Amino acid sequence: ETGVTQSPTHLIKTRGQQVTLRCSSQSGHNTVSWYQQALGQGPQFIFQYYREEENGRGNFPPRFSGLQFPNYSSELNVNALELDDSALYLCASSLDSSNTEAFFGQGTRLTVV
Amino acid sequence: SQKIEQNSEALNIQEGKTATLTCNYTNYSPAYLQWYRQDPGRGPVFLLLIRENEKEKRKERLKVTFDTTLKQSLFHITASQPADSATYLCAPRGTGNTPLVFGKGTRLSVIA
């Protein structure tokens, strides 16, 4: 158990819809990162939040957005869903330092039809 | 832009042998390099972290090396077991609170 939980575990949405994925980080972890993992690929970095501010973003369009809350929970929002958004979405929490490990949730499997 | 390459998508070895996985990076000077294990449908799990001034790090049957001149890390599993079968991901990382960026991973299969 990593202490990081994600909800829901599975989700099916229709193209064009919007989706919100949720993550509960480990207590005390000020940094949360979100990743998209397509089948057979490594996790692709979407963005990172530190103390409720975005402090890093990967190569994803603005329709991918996020929020981090003071209670160590966070959200990933995706608007105007496309078929290619179908993937495993992972969140990871960590302390605010590069020499520490990241703790991942079990992921949310999103299918866009 | 940063590029992270892991030697092969899949690696098959016999039980008891040593598995060696390679991670190469370009356009990057990481201060740390982390290795994770990922099982199908699960999130990655941290295994080892090595600093740029460390040549080698060991943990039980695992060994990681870090060569900043070659821009390469090697990950070894000695006396491999079928339970070691998984995808292994490397993630070089800069200083400060920089994001963790992964390679594509190498899928290891240990055959009994």
Image: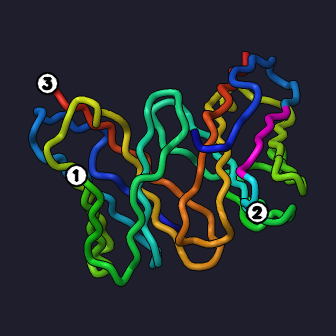
State how many labels appear. Answer: 3
Left or right, B21 with respect to B112, comes to right
Q: Quadrant of residue B3?
A: bottom left
- Check disc 2 and report its element: helix, strand or loop: loop
- Residues marked 2 and 3 touching at CB (< 8 Å): no
Residue stretch rendered in magenta on the structure: A20-26
Q: Which residue is disc 3 drawn over?
A: B112
Disc 1: CA contacts within 10 A as few (<14), some (14-19) or many (>=20): few
- Check disc 3 and report its element: helix, strand or loop: loop
Look at 18% across and 40% down and name the residue there. B80
Q: Are marks 3 and 1 on the same chain?
A: yes
Instruction: Name the amino acid type tagged 3.
Output: Ala
Q: CA distance from mark 2 to mark 1?
A: 32 Å
Residue A18 position, x and y percent, is 88, 30
Q: Which residue is disc 2 drawn over?
A: A30
Q: Which mark is residue B61?
A: 1
Q: Quadrant of the N terminus of chain A?
A: top right
Q: Are marks 2 and 1 on the same chain?
A: no
> Which of pointers 3 and 1 lies earlier in the amino acid sequence?
1
Instruction: Name the amino acid type tagged 1.
Output: Arg
Look at 81% across and 52% down and name the residue there. A72
Disc 2: CA contacts within 10 A as few (<14), some (14-19) or many (>=20): many
